Amino acid sequence: MAISEREWKMIIIVSVLVGLATISAILRLFARYKLRVRIEADDYLCFTALFLLYGMLIQLILWVAIGGNGTHIKYLSPETLLTFGKIFIANQFTYFALVPILKISFISFYRRIFFTSHRFNVISCTFIWIIGIWGAGIFLICALQCRPLRGYWDKSIEAHCINGNIFFIVNQGFNVVMDFVILALPLPIIFNLKRAWQDKLALTGIFALGGFVCFASIYRIVVLFYIDPADPTHTVYRATLWTHIEPSVGLICSCLPTIRGLFPAYRWHSRSSPYPPDHHDYINSSSNRGAEHLVPSDLSKNSVYIMMEDGVVKPEQDHGWVEDRHDIEENEGRREGGIVRRTDTKVVQGLV
């Protein structure tokens, strides 16, 4: 089957985005290695999402090459229509597994670097459960949308099926809401950081790139309405394209905050720092190369700061030292005005 120019463009666009997602994931892993930060749950989820993204790309290529995606149904043979339906259902399963994993990866990353209060812990954990339960439910509904499931692609047998378009739109509506939640979740913490406003703006800009993911989710709802049941093979084109764009861009955005840690020249210093140069002490860690940061020497006795891997300093809202979810060497490095060193964060207690 000849592939049209429009279909080639779709394959190229998605391939480029998957390539960028791959580069982002590799840089994320390299940043972990360079900063000597252990691989955590969010990283494993990220690479699981990348693996599923490869699966979607392979499905897309097959869908266009032998499944008739983008071609008017009147030009397709019955065998091609069967292939179209099989790849379509396979693509749904992959997408319904990928999106929740990617969203949970986002929130897991927040929990690791913004683990500053019991309230944030409870809120983030709640959304992880909501997304996980919803994702499992959607996956189950996908498997049961036709009884028997073979009836989804084989119209010659009698089957009872749900309205596919309504199913997709309801699920996508949930995805849009969760995308905005994920986008907004770290903003209150970012604007409470003890950093110059330019640094806050830069960090906010990185997270705000997730706004494009929100746009992609919303636009995907729009293009779902373009699917015509009388000619699904041709009208599914836009929905197919944005079904692949959305998770690809999401994965790229999930890696950017970590990749930022590879550029210390842009992380740690600000011309408009609220503290003059002579009021800072350099705190260097040989176990976290590149993690030099300026910490004010005139901190109050009760001030506690968290130094995250991307160089952001956050005032601790709870009293006392932060409870680490990993092994903390409680006695190593602890002294008056000293540092307790954690796997991926440092807690700095203010000088008297």
Image (tube, rainbow, N blue to C red):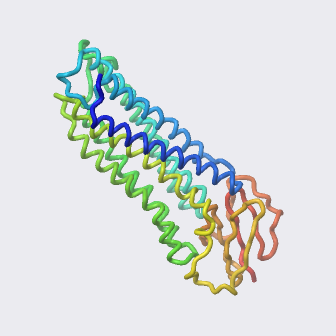
Q: Is residue 208 above or below residue 178?
A: below
Q: Is residue 277 above or below residue 221?
A: below
Question: Which residue shows up at 37% across the image and 43% down it?
Answer: 13
Where residue 349 sits, quadrant-wise, is bottom right
Q: Percent position (x, y) of residue 142? A: 36, 29
Question: Quarter of the image containing the N terminus?
Answer: top left
Asked whether, in this view, residue 94 is left or right of residue 36, the answer is: left
Q: Percent position (x, y) of residue 305? A: 65, 71
Asked whether, in this view, residue 181 is left or right of residue 107, the answer is: left
| Residue 88 in view of the camera | no
Count of numbered marks:
0
Q: Percent position (x, y) of residue 149? A: 34, 20
Front-lying residue, 191 or 21: 21
Front-lying residue, 159 or 40: 40
| Residue 161 in view of the camera | yes
Question: Quarter of the image containing the C terminus?
Answer: bottom right
Q: Percent position (x, y) of residue 184? A: 43, 61
Question: Which residue shows up at 19% across the image and 22% down it?
Answer: 75
